[in-house]
């Protein structure tokens, strides 16, 4: 019964890291179900019953980094590198707008060369301009979110000025030691730089998202509890987190497979608990049910909608590129197109008893509270 009385405290609820760690590892089903039910009630109270869609376009798999866990890391030789053309990206944005998705997320490997940044700036401006022209109802056009890695503060400012207003940069783990094991020690993959980037993004004015992978080799429940504290301390607006899924040809994948592993059910349960605890402690942030959840349990994303998640990020990447953006094995929807993803996700939202917030940006209330 540990945890129950505290879970009823409501608004000014502050959970200790010890209690979070306990709730991440506890076996008592009644307590776990109580935690999920409480997350749902915190969500209804602070966010409501709506789920918002953010279409994700994985527009390039070219990356200067070599993160040890990632299936498109620089050293992966079998990956055919691509960058979608401006017209291809705009086509996805049009689809997104016409289907009532409030916003689009442009995601890619990390690239810092000037020509590529100019291309991205042009794409962002064109999406904003075109969607505002298409917007006969004079709403706000399509919101643009980015997930294009570590950049200088000046570049973040340029991206913001071009019209992007959200940015996702996961810290991956808030434990600097674990971070150093998961990344090459070459000066390019530094925990401090990543942390500074998250702080720069907030200062520039982005609605800022971060997050972690759950179930990494060498990661403890204490680490995950500390990750939740990190989200609270950094006062971010969105948390994008999901299970680590193995890619067997990566250094982390090899390490993972050499150890005794937790089952998919345990990993899924841990991921749901992280979502629920994030909702309970952070209340009004945006929490997407990420694709990786579905990679481990087929209806994983809709179950997450009842445990704290309030957003879905359907993949809009054209089918011909999807197989080259396989961050991990078993990534879902690799052979499907945007239309199939839309229908499938709408059904998933209805199944979870939620309403779809069409045409709305779905901004996190947290952002307006902190700014
Ligand atoms: N390059 C940008 C960056 O790293 O921020 C954005 C793209 S990157 C592919 C997006 C996220 O994919 C990373 O933040 C990481 O958490 C996640 N990712 C990479 N490999 C993964 C794996 N094997 N399992 C689960 N998530 C993974
Ligand atoms: Fe590149 Fe992002 Fe993958 Fe790291 S996680 S290798 S930065 S795409």
Image: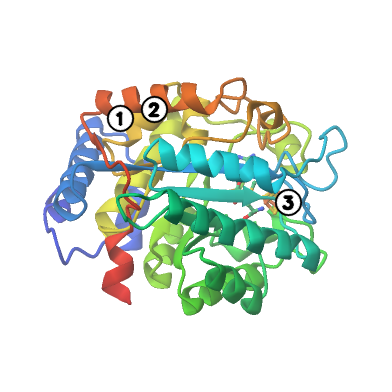
Question: Which of pointers 1 and 3 lies earlier in the amino acid sequence?
Answer: 3
**Is there CB contact under 8 Å for labels 3 and 2?**
no
Q: Residues within 10 Å of mark 3 (few under 14, many from 20)?
A: many
Q: Is residue 185 left or right of residue 23?
A: right
Looking at the rendered structure, which numbered label has been put on residue 345? Answer: 2
Q: Quadrant of residue 260?
A: top right
What residue is shown at x 61% (from left), y 49% (from top)? 107
Give the percent coordinates (x, y) of residue 336. Answer: 57, 21
What residue is shown at x 72% (from left), y 65% (from top)? 118
Question: Which of pointers 3 and 2 lies earlier in the amino acid sequence?
Answer: 3
Pick the front one: 101 or 45: 101
Query: Can see residue 290?
Result: no
Residue 109's place in the image compared with 94, above or below, is: below
Residue at the extreme right of the image, as rendered: 77
In the structure shown, which secondary structural element does the residue marked by tag 3 occupy? loop
Q: Is residue 141 left or right of residue 155?
A: left
Mark 1 or 3: the one toward you? 1
Give the percent coordinates (x, y) of residue 195. Answer: 57, 70
Residue 352's place in the image compared with 63, above or below, is: above
Q: Residues within 10 Å of mark 2 (few under 14, many from 20)?
A: some
Pick the front one: 359 or 5: 359
Residue underneath mark 1: 349
Give the percent coordinates (x, y) of residue 342. Answer: 42, 28
Residue underneath mark 3: 67
* Mark 1 C-beta to ligand 1 under 8 Å: no
What residue is shown at x 46% (from left), y 59% (from top)? 227
Give the percent coordinates (x, y) of residue 293. Answer: 47, 33
* Mark 3 C-beta to ligand 2 under 8 Å: yes
What residue is shown at x 75% (from left), y 45% (from top)? 83
In the structure shown, which secondary structural element does the residue marked by tag 2 occupy? helix
**Is there CB contact under 8 Å for labels 1 and 2?**
yes
């Amino acid at each position: 019964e540990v945890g129950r009385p505290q879970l009823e405290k409501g608004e000014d609820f502050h959970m200790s890291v010890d209690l979070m760690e306990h709730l991440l590892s506890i076996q008592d089903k009644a307590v776990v179900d109580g935690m999920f039910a409480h997350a749902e009630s915190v969500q209804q109270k602070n966010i409501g019953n709506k789920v918002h869609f953010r279409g994700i376009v994985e527009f390039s798999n070219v990356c200067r980094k070599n993160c040890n866990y990632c299936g498109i890391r620089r050293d992966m030789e079998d990956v055919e590198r691509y960058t979608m053309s401006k017209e291809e990206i705009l086509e996805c944005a049009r689809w997104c707008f016409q289907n009532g998705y409030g916003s689009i997320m442009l995601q890619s490997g990390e690239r810092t060369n000037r020509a590529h940044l100019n291309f991205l700036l042009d794409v962002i401006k064109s999406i904003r301009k075109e969607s505002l022209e298409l917007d006969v109802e004079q709403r706000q056009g399509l919101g643009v979110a980015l997930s294009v890695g570590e950049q200088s503060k000046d570049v973040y400012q340029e991206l913001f000025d071009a019209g992007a207003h959200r940015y996702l940069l996961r810290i991956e783990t808030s434990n600097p030691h674990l971070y150093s094991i998961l990344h090459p020690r070459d000066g390019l993959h530094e925990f401090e730089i990543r942390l500074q980037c998250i702080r720069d993004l907030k200062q520039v004015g982005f609605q800022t998202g971060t997050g972690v992978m759950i179930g990494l080799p060498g990661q403890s429940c204490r680490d995950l509890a500390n990750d939740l504290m990190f989200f609270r301390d950094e006062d971010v607006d969105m948390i994008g987190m999901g299970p680590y899924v193995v890619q067997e040809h990566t250094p982390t994948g090899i390490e993972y497979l050499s150890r005794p592993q937790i089952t998919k059910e345990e990993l899924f349960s841990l991921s749901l608990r992280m979502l629920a605890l994030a909702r309970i402690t952070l209340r009004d942030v945006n929490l997407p049910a990420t694709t990786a959840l579905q990679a481990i349990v087929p209806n994983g994303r809709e179950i997450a909608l009842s445990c704290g998640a309030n957003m879905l990020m359907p993949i809009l990447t054209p089918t011909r590129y999807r197989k080259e953006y396989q961050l991990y094995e078993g990534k879902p929807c690799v052979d499907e197109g945007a239309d199939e993803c839309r229908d499938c996700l709408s059904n998933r939202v209805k199944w979870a008893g939620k309403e779809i917030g069409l045409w709305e940006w779905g901004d996190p209330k947290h952002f307006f509270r902190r700014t």
